[in-house]
Image (spheres, rainbow, N blue to C red):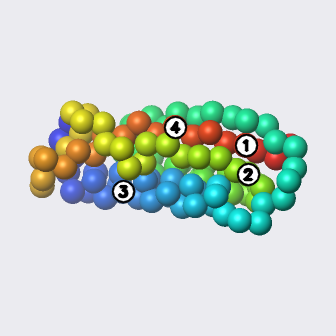
Amino acid sequence: MVLSDEAVADLSTSLESLKGLNDFLHAPGKEEVELHETAHVIAFAALLHNQKAISSFCDLVKANANTRGEVYGLDNPINGLATAASDPTRQLGRFVTLELMVGL
């Protein structure tokens, strides 16, 4: 898949939202509470075409101040999935997963 400059910007918006979420998940000062583990896979199509949903998901997770976890795959390109039209050597594909520990 070859992404236009607009599509690259949309993808970057989604990835920045998730990077902000990852920072939140590792922020100091979280209280020790009973937690429930959840796992999530973010489809590449959602990263590319649904930035508002990604942002809303991140906001929902951040609503619980004690949520911990990890976002995987933000900085690990999947070769051959997507490239930038302006730079065909730039690999943009991502397989993003999240593990969350959410307070009960």
Give the CA distance from mark 1 to mark 4.
Answer: 14 Å
Q: Residue at the spot x=73%, y=51% of the render? A: 67
Coordinates of residue 95 in the picture (x, y in percent) = 41, 36
**Label 3: which residue?**
12
Q: Which residue is mark 4?
A: 97
| Direction bottom: furthest residue | 29
Residue depicted at x 45% and y 59%: 16
How far from the left and from the top, in percent, is residue 93? 31, 40
- Secondary structure found at label 2: loop
90 on left or right of 11 = left
Residue 33 in the image, given as x and y percentages of width and height: 87, 50
Would residue 56 appear left or right of 3 to someone viewing this image? right
At label 2, the amino acid type is Thr
Mark 2, residue position = 67
The number of callouts visible is: 4
State the CA–CA distance, disc 3 to disc 1: 26 Å
Sequence-earlier tag: 3 or 4:
3
Q: Which residue is mark 1?
A: 101
Q: In the displayed structure, would residue 85 be above or below residue 45?
A: below
